[in-house]
Image: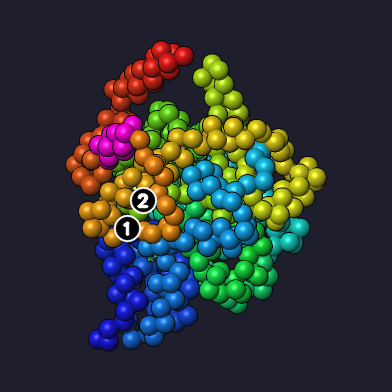
């Protein structure tokens, strides 16, 4: 068997748990020498096909992302604050005026509305989005959607890995332009691919990025099904954000019944626990909280009022306009009354995303620095790390403690069983009560 350096390096990235499963290596390979396995990790089934051109390694965001270079590529020469939500022109709260989209979406349906509008106006001829596998509904799957109903079907977050950039190869012979939807790490891979293959830039009309704290392994949903005594083969559909915002994890069974996998909403209940029990390894080194290099970034509005209630409930998306393209598209859709957009003060943008921002920019940076000092291979972002206070270091240690069961199947299942039980519900209410008391004491 011939030795192929680039493939060996990709295998090392996977082995060192640095692979994001973004699919960029698959999407760029001119020889189709790399494919993904069942868990979406890339591998080369036949070394003979690879000509060792090195493209797969050059585009890999798992091992390095040159932030300053991508900032320049996206926004030109600007002062850039690496410890914020990135460069933006205006922050908004947004909501689609289409009830059907709103019902199916995660928050305000802004992403799906933008795609639907651009496709119907023939401004784009396709969209790279993430949907669910029909035979394994807990598993995400990227598709190049060409029809409105495919775009609608892809609405709503899937808390599961999607190798979005594996679809870049489909753009080679694609007649027309596409909109692209991805998580921050997908956009890192995309930007690296664009810098090597300029033709890709012409194919992509707009990049829409999601805000992202962590992604979780698909086994998290399977464990929740198991804990709720639901057989995998009986599941027709999983809706991670079912019902009124912020939504609950809902299951539709093949016999027509509908169930919820957890008593409480996405934010207050299951998801926070899932991110500690089943986080994807590479997410623990991720420092981009808000898709800093997208044209438009979209997230949930986690802003509370003085009474501790969510200020924007009822289905709104936090929308960050970053580029001229983003501005043009948002104002066009707004003028056609398809989207309600309310400009918000900058401090609300920060407030909404401050916990994730802290985790990404401080906690994950400390973890990265610590691993590097221990001699581990870690991703290089080409930026100087911020100063850390003793409090930051202590918070990181505590956060790491909450991750201690993530590699134990026994504890994962035990905790999930507890989480979906009535006793788990009491514990969550107790935690919320304590949090409220701490807050009142601070005021
Ligand atoms: C793993 C993950 C973590 C997130 N973490 C946060 C967070 O910490 N804070 C926050 O404010 N927002 C977060 N979001 C974004 C949030 O859940 C909503 O997607 C966002 O508010 C947009 O809502 P919408 O109603 O406008 O989008 P919708 O109209 O519902 O459209 C959602 C779009 O997301 C795409 N998508 C769904 N799942 C994936 C996936 N796994 N990978 C790539 N693309 C996908 C779909 O293609 C679809 O086009 C996260 C999303 C995901 C998938
Ligand atoms: S080195 Fe080139 S041909 Fe080989 S897998 Fe990577 S991209 Fe494909
Ligand atoms: S390009 Fe993406 S999928 Fe490929 S090895 Fe790197 S991180 Fe993994
Ligand atoms: S936390 Fe970072 S690495 Fe993980 S899915 Fe989100 S953007 Fe990707």
Q: Report whether the residue tagged 2 is closer than 8 Å to ligand 4.
A: yes
Where in the figure is residue 310, as x and y percent of width and height? Answer: 55, 25
Mark 2 touching mark 1, by CB under 8 A?
Answer: yes
Q: Earlier in the sequence, mark 2 or mark 1?
A: 2
Q: Observer-nearest residue: 153 or 25?
A: 25
Residue occupying the point 62% across, 35% down: 346
Drawn side of residue 339 relative to residue 86, left or right: right
Span colored in magenta: 390-403
Residue drawn at x 28%, y 55% is 372
Q: Position of residue 321 (x, y in %)?
A: 65, 47
For the N terminus, the image quarter is bottom left
367 to the left or right of 330: left
Determine the image quadrant of residue 200: bottom right
In front here: 199 or 227? 199
Magenta span main SS: helix
Q: Which residue is mark 1?
A: 378
Residue 237, given in percent of the width and then of the height, sits at 46, 46
Magenta run includes residue 400: yes
Mark 2 = which residue?
285
The reply to whether the magenta stretch includes residue 245 is: no
User: How many badges with numbers are in the image?
Assistant: 2
Which element is circle 2 on? helix
In the displayed structure, would residue 391 be above or below residue 288? above
């Amino acid at each position: 068997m011939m030795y192929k350096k680039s493939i060996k390096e990709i295998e090392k990235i996977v082995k060192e748990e640095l692979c994001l499963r973004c699919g960029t290596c698959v999407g760029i390979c001119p020889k189709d020498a790399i494919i993904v396995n069942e868990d979406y990790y890339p591998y080369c089934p036949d070394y003979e096909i690879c000509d060792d051109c090195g493209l797969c390694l050059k585009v890999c965001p798992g091992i390095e992302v040159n932030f300053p270079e991508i900032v320049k590529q996206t926004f030109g020469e600007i002062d850039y604050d690496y410890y914020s939500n990135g460069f933006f022109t205006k922050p908004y709260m947004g909501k689609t005026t289409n009830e059907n989209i709103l019902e199916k979406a995660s928050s305000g349906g802004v992403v799906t509305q933008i795609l639907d509008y651009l496709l119907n106006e023939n401004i784009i001829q396709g969209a790279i989005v993430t949907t669910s596998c029909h035979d394994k509904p807990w598993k995400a799957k990227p598709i190049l959607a060409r029809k409105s109903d495919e775009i609608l079907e892809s609405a709503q977050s899937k808390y599961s890995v999607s190798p979005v950039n594996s679809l870049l190869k489909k753009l080679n012979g694609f007649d027309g332009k596409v909109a692209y939807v991805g998580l921050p790490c997908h956009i890192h891979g995309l930007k690296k691919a664009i810098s090597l293959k300029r033709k890709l830039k012409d194919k992509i009309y707009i990049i829409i990025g999601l805000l992202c704290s962590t992604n979780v392994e698909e086994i998290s949903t399977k464990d929740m099904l198991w804990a709720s005594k639901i057989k995998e083969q009986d599941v027709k559909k999983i809706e991670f954000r079912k019902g009124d915002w912020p939504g609950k994890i809902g299951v539709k069974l093949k016999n027509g019944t509908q169930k919820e996998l957890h008593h409480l909403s996405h934010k207050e209940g299951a998801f926070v626990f899932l991110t500690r029990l089943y986080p994807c390894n590479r997410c623990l080194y991720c420092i981009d909280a808000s898709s800093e290099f997208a044209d438009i970034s979209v997230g949930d509005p986690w802003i509370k009022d003085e009474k501790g209630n969510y200020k924007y409930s009822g289905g709104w998306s936090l929308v960050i306009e970053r580029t001229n393209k983003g501005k043009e598209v948002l104002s066009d859709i707004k003028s056609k009354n398809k989207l309600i957009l309310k400009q918000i003060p900058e401090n609300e943008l920060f407030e909404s995303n401050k916990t994730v921002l802290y985790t990404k920019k401080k906690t994950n940076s400390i973890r990265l620095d610590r691993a590097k000092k221990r001699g581990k291979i870690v991703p290089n972002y080409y930026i100087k790390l911020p100063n850390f206070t003793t409090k930051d270091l202590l918070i990181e240690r505590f956060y790491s403690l909450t991750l201690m069961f993530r590699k134990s199947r026994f504890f994962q299942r035990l905790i999930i069983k507890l989480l979906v039980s009535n006793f788990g519900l009491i514990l969550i209410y107790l935690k919320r009560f304590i949090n409220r008391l701490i807050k009142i004491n601070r005021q």
